[in-house]
Image: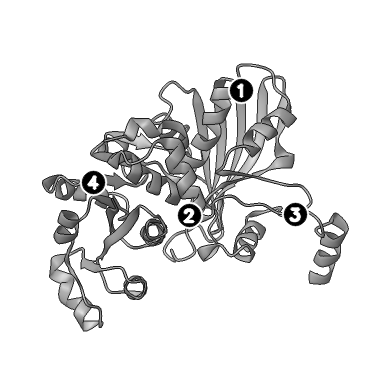
């Protein structure tokens, strides 16, 4: 049976989730809801997604813009088996009663407070907690990135404490109202940042401290992590462990992928839609250990790493697949899993290229 999925909010996350749902053999897009007939609304219609007016009073605006609507958002909620709410932070909580009024399970995003849903969700860490739930919150991009590391480390070695400094982009490429433009901001100045408490919604007993910065960049977040484990480990053993994680890309030495900009270029060259990076991008050469302390750097693509998590959350709430089956199917249909051959990317060639650019 096909799972009919409605997507309320067709922006940065919503449009990616809709495309991911459309790629699944066991799901179909019942429709998407927008508040206004902008370029994204036109794109949705071109992709064949039925369009619903998120604000009934604005429905005539879609007709004026040449977009035929299938109805208002209430009708979409009534028709869908599951709703994915990808509206701006705070709006999802306002929509919760709408979904409940039609007994339609709802999946919210990490911009909402944790109490919006019964379960905060990361497929690798707590898939089974969301099975059959009426409301699920897929945690934020940064919390997703940290959770994907904590889960295998906890299973393999035990985790005593996590310390993370998150260097966060000032805004997404299309967010021209965000910043800073020419500054580096502790955000927040106090400790911890909200990310530590958010990770604890997935791992309630985890000891974690987080600090945050905002910088004038749009491409990706970068995390500097120190994890104190419960047993001594070697960097080689940790690297082997993380290379076995399907949503962690351990960047090989020699590729010249020394920053977020080149990672985005790599994703585009690899044919990724919108240049998306669904995986944690972890620099293999950054993995270092001192006794029980592990250190590493990773980059997180804030626009896309939660997309496969939303797909898995749909299967969890509908109880249509177990964790391993869902993750494998999502990865296979989306093409999750980057690889690269360092051949031809020698350091000398990189130096020559940079010299030519100068």
Q: Badges 1 and 4: C-beta atoms under 8 Å apart?
A: no
The answer to whether residue 189 is left or right of residue 113 is right
Sequence-wise first label, 2 or 1: 1
Q: Badges 2 and 1: C-beta atoms under 8 Å apart?
A: no
x and y, in percent, of residue 190 in the image: 46, 35
Using the numbered discs, state the Cα–Cα distance from disc 2 to disc 1 in whole angstroms: 36 Å
**Crowding near the residue tagged with mark 2, few <14, some 14–19, many ≥20 C-alpha atoms within 10 Å:** some
x and y, in percent, of residue 9 in the image: 30, 60
Sequence-wise first label, 3 or 1: 1
**Crowding near the residue tagged with mark 3, few <14, some 14–19, many ≥20 C-alpha atoms within 10 Å:** few
> Quarter of the image holding residue 309?
top left
Q: Secondary structure at mark 1?
A: strand
Considering every residue shown, the one lying at the far right of the view is: 348
Q: Which residue is mark 2?
A: 333
Query: 6 or 274: nearer the eye?
Result: 6
x and y, in percent, of residue 328 in the image: 49, 44
The answer to whether residue 84 is left or right of residue 253 is left
Q: Nearer the viewer, mark 2 or mark 4?
A: 2
**Crowding near the residue tagged with mark 4, few <14, some 14–19, many ≥20 C-alpha atoms within 10 Å:** some
Report the disc number at residue 228. Answer: 1
The answer to whether residue 245 is left or right of residue 179 is right
x and y, in percent, of residue 121 in the image: 38, 37
Sequence-wise first label, 1 or 4: 4
Using the numbered discs, state the Cα–Cα distance from disc 3 to disc 1 in whole angstroms: 32 Å
Quadrant of the image containing the C terminus: bottom right
Report the disc number at residue 93. Answer: 4
Q: Which residue is mark 3?
A: 341
Q: Badges 4 and 3: C-beta atoms under 8 Å apart?
A: no
Colour setup of the view: one colour
Considering every residue shown, the one lying at the far top of the view is: 231
> Quarter of the image holding residue 38?
bottom left
């Amino acid at each position: 049976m096909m799972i009919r999925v409605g997507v309320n909010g067709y922006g940065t996350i919503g449009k990616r989730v809709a495309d991911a749902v459309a790629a699944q053999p066991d799901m179909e897009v019942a429709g998407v809801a927008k508040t206004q007939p902008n370029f994204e609304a036109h794109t949705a219609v071109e992709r064949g997604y039925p369009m619903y007016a998120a604000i009934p009073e604005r429905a005539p605006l879609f007709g004026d813009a040449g977009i035929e609507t299938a109805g208002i958002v209430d009708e979409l909620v009534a028709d869908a088996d599951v709703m994915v709410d990808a509206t701006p932070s705070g709006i999802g909580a306002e929509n919760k009663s709408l979904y409940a009024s039609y007994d339609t399970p709802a999946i919210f995003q990490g911009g909402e407070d944790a109490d919006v849903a019964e379960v905060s969700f990361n497929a690798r860490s707590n898939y089974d907690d969301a099975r059959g739930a009426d409301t699920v919150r897929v945690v934020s991009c940064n919390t997703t990135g940290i959770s994907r590391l904590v889960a295998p480390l906890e299973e393999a070695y035990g985790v005593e404490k996590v310390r993370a400094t998150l260097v966060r982009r000032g805004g997404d490429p299309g967010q021209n109202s965000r910043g800073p433009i020419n500054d580096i901001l502790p955000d927040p100045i106090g400790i911890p940042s909200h990310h530590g408490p958010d990770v604890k919604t997935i791992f309630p007993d985890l000891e974690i401290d987080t600090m945050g910065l905002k910088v004038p960049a749009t491409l990706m977040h970068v995390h500097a992590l120190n994890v104190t484990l419960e047993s001594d480990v070697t960097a080689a053993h940790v690297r082997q462990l993380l290379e076995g994680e399907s949503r962690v890309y351990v960047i090989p030495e020699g590729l010249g992928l020394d920053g977020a900009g080149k990672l985005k270029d790599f994703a585009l060259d690899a044919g990724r839609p919108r240049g998306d990076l669904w995986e944690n991008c972890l620099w293999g050469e950054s993995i270092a250990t001192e006794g029980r302390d592990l250190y590493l750097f990773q980059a997180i693509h804030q626009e896309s790493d939660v997309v496969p998590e939303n797909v898995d959350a749909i299967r969890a709430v509908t109880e249509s697949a177990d964790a391993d089956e869902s993750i494998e199917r999502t990865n296979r249909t989306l093409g999750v899993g980057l690889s690269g051959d360092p051949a031809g990317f020698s350091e000398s060639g990189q130096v020559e290229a940079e010299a030519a650019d100068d």
